[in-house]
Structure formats: structure tokens, C-alpha cells
Amino acid sequence: MSPVPSNGKDSATARILGSGTSGIAELFIFHPVDTVAKRLMSNKTSVATTGLNNILFRDAAAASFGRKFLSLFPGLGYAAGYKVAQRVYKFGGQPWFNDLINKHYKTQFTNTFGERKGKLMMQAAAGSLTGIGEVVLLPLDVLKIKRQVNPEAFRGRGVIRIFAEEGTALYRGWGWTMARNAPGSFALFGASAFTKDYVLGVQDYSKATWGQNFVASIAGAVASITVAAPLDVVKTRIQNANFEKKVSGVTVVKDLIKNEGMGAFFKGLTPKILVVGPKLVFSYTLAQSLIPLFAQYV
């Protein structure tokens, strides 16, 4: 296949292929780490009392190393559907929102923040809008989390039966999800753009090198995860309950503060931060590298 002439903007197909490929690569490498983080966030007892081994590996706590490792891959099918769709939407959708803002609101942003900061704020705003819209993928996220931390909730039911029986219950916690995603995605794309522009001196973000994308994505991801951590814990607690158990976010917050203290809002933050660098190599950085590559052919 021969390269196609470039019109200065990556095609929708290239964005889908590049971001989708990065999602698949990220899934197989980091799904176990995500499971560890979710189980730590869902644990309501003291680690000293229950034991880290029992919290992380559950029924496989006394099994061999191989079985323990495989026990960190529950809900892989749901995770695949969610992660690939999420990455296609987030990494492919944010540039679309940014194009939209550039087309209709660039003057307002430039007049308010100046040309340089206006460009940065448009990137962050586009990220925030992308994060809010990500709520449409919530059912897949709910099923993935339940498989990771509360598989008993399925009771032998398949995905089609669950969708038919649970309906809107799969969108439980949608408000908290949007509240987490809006500032989280704002911080992700905003801090990344800030790092490229003010730290690395990159004026055209699309021409950043792999190394520059790598450094900028670490800064963006650390900012995003830290900002969204408290709301992420609340969202996870709401979603991992049994389907028939309706728990409000306010109740979760009250119980969490009462029984576990304010520090519980940041449960699971450390393992997330520890994998930010390599995770973004295989997701954000990989997507940024693959999208222009695919754009040469589609």
C-alpha cells in the first residue's frame, strides 16, 4: 500500500487504528496491575488484619505462582471491549473535540488566555469534554470492575442476559464517573500540553518526538490520576457492589470517612502512579506515534 498525500490533519481511520492498537497493547500488559489497584481500592479492612496476599489473590492466595498470576486477569473479555473502546474514544476523540473548539471558539480562548496559553487551554478543554462523554462506555467499565473485585455478582449470567436484566443499573455511578473524568482528562491533556510547550519547547504538538510524548504523557498522567483519585475510589465502591444493591455516592463518602479516614480516598494511588511511565509508553505515546504512521496510508 502506498502512502497517501497528507492534508495536514490525521484521518479518522488513522486515529481509530492508532488508538485502538495502543489500547490492545496496554490491556495485555497492564490488566493485572489494574486488577491489583481495583482490589486495593475495594478493600474495606486493614491490610495488617487481612493480609496483602489474601486481598490481591483472593481464592488463589494459597495457589501456585502461575495460578496467582492468572487470577489477576478476571473479566479480560469485558476489559478488552472497554479498554479498546476507551482508548479509541479518548485518544481519537480528543483531537476531534480540539478541532471543533479550534474551529468555533479559538478567538474566545485566545482573547481570554493569550495565544500560547489559549492553545494549551483548548487542549485541556477538549480533554475534559472527551472525559465527560466517556460515560457512554460505563456499562463495560462496570462489568470489568465487578469481574475483578466481585465476580459473585454475575451468578453465572452471560453479558447479554445481564444487559437485559440490569438495564440502567449498569449506569450506576454515572454522575461520579463524569465528575471524575472531567477534571481527570482536563489534567491529562492540559499537563501534557503544558509540558510539551513550556518545558520541552514543542510548538507543534503533533510533531513531538517519541521521547517528548513519553515525558509529557508521564506529567499528564500523574496529574490526572492524582486529581481524579478520590472520586475514582468512590466510583469503584459504587460499581463493585452487587447489582441489586443500590449504594449512593454520598453514603459511600460518609462510610469511607467514618470507617477508614480521609487517607482512604487515595487507596490504590501508589500502584497506579508506579505504572504511569510504562503504561503511557504503551498507550498515549504509542497512539501518538501510530496515528501519524497510519495516516500515511489511510
Image (cartoon, grey):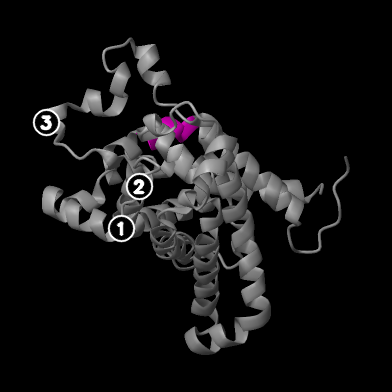
139 to the left or right of 271: right
Can residue 29 be seen here? The reply is yes
Label 1 Cα crowd, 10 Å radius (few <14 / some 14-19 / many 20+): some
Residue drawn at (34%, 33%) of the image: 36
What residue span does the magenta drawing correspond to?
29-35
Rendering coords of residue 219 (x, y %): 40, 55
Rendering coords of residue 57 (x, y %): 31, 23
Rendering coords of residue 148 (x, y %): 40, 33
**Given contact means CB atoms under 8 Å apart, are the residues at marks 2 and 1 in contact?**
no
Please, which residue is most extreme toward the top here?
64
Marks 2 and 3, how far apart in space? 22 Å
Figure quadrant of the N terminus: top right
Rendering coords of residue 228 (x, y %): 35, 57
**Given contact means CB atoms under 8 Å apart, are the residues at marks 1 and 3 in contact?**
no
Residue drawn at (57%, 55%) of the image: 90
Q: Secondary structure at mark 3?
A: helix
Residue 18 counted in the magenta span: no
Marks 2 and 1, how far apart in space? 10 Å
Q: Quadrant of residue 179?
A: bottom left
Which three-letter amino acid code belongs to the residue tagged 3?
Ala
Q: Quadrant of residue 145?
A: top left
- Mark 2 vs 1, N-terminal side: 2
Res 48 label: 3
Residue 34 counted in the magenta span: yes
Label 3 Cα crowd, 10 Å radius (few <14 / some 14-19 / many 20+): few
Which three-letter amino acid code belongs to the residue tagged 2?
Thr
Residue drawn at (41%, 30%) of the image: 32
The kind of secondary structure the magenta stretch mainly shows is helix
Res 249 label: 1
Res 236 label: 2
